[in-house]
Image (tube, rainbow, N blue to C red):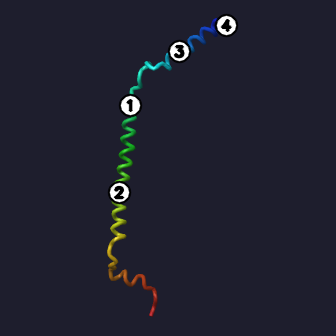
């Protein structure tokens, strides 16, 4: 029984040393699905960014717009009765 344990321990030690060696092969990098996932995330951010810029432009245009009111809006703020 001790020989079995010694053999398994020896194989385990040499196996971990082989896996931890520097020349164990490099990874393949990102796969095809990972690239699609990253591209999908970028598209989501872009499709959120463009309407956000349009909304910001509309808010800035309304903020700096001249104070002219339409004829109906001039009376809407006046609730006093004479």
Provide residue 6's location: percent of width, then percent of height. Answer: 62, 9
How far apart marks 1 and 4 lie (CA) works out to 45 Å
Split into 4 quadrants, where in the image is the N terminus? top right
Nearer the N terminus, badge 3 or badge 2? Answer: 3
Q: CA distance from mark 2 to mark 1?
A: 31 Å
**First of labels 1, 4 by sequence position:** 4
Give the label on residue 51, or none: 2
Query: Residue 31's spot in the image, x, y percent?
Result: 38, 31
Give the distance between the C-alpha atoms of the residues marked 3 and 2, in whole angstroms: 55 Å
Which residue was labeled with disc 3?
A: 15
Q: Secondary structure at mark 3?
A: helix
Q: Residue at x 50, y 20 (%)?
A: 20
For discs 1 and 4, the disc positioned in front in the rendered view: 4
Name the disc covering residue 31, or none. 1
Q: Secondary structure at mark 2?
A: helix
Q: Are marks 4 and 3 in contact (CB under 8 Å)?
A: no
Ranked by sequence position, the earlier of labels 4 and 3 is 4
Q: Does label 4 or label 2 sit earlier along the sequence? A: 4
The quarter of the picture where the C terminus appears is: bottom left
Label 3, residues with CA under 10 Å away: few <14, some 14-19, many ≥20 = few
Residue at 35% in and 69% down:
62
Q: Earlier in the sequence, mark 2 or mark 1?
A: 1
Q: Nearer the viewer, mark 3 or mark 1?
A: 3
Residue 7 sits above or below residue 46 on the image: above
Q: CA distance from mark 3 to mark 1?
A: 27 Å
- Above or below — where is 5 with respect to 73? above
Q: Which residue is labeled 4 in the image?
A: 2
What is the C-alpha distance between the residues marked 4 and 2? 71 Å
Where is residue 33? Give x, y as percent.
Answer: 39, 34
Q: Residue furthest front?
A: 22
């Amino acid at each position: 029984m001790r020989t079995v344990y010694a053999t398994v321990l020896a194989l385990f030690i040499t196996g971990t040393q082989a896996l931890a060696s520097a020349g164990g092969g490099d990874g393949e990098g990102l796969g095809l699905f990972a690239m699609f996932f990253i591209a999908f995330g970028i598209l989501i951010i872009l499709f959120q960014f463009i309407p956000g810029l349009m909304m910001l432009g509309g808010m800035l245009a309304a903020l700096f717009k001249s104070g002219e009111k339409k004829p109906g809006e001039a009376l809407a703020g006046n609730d006093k009765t004479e």
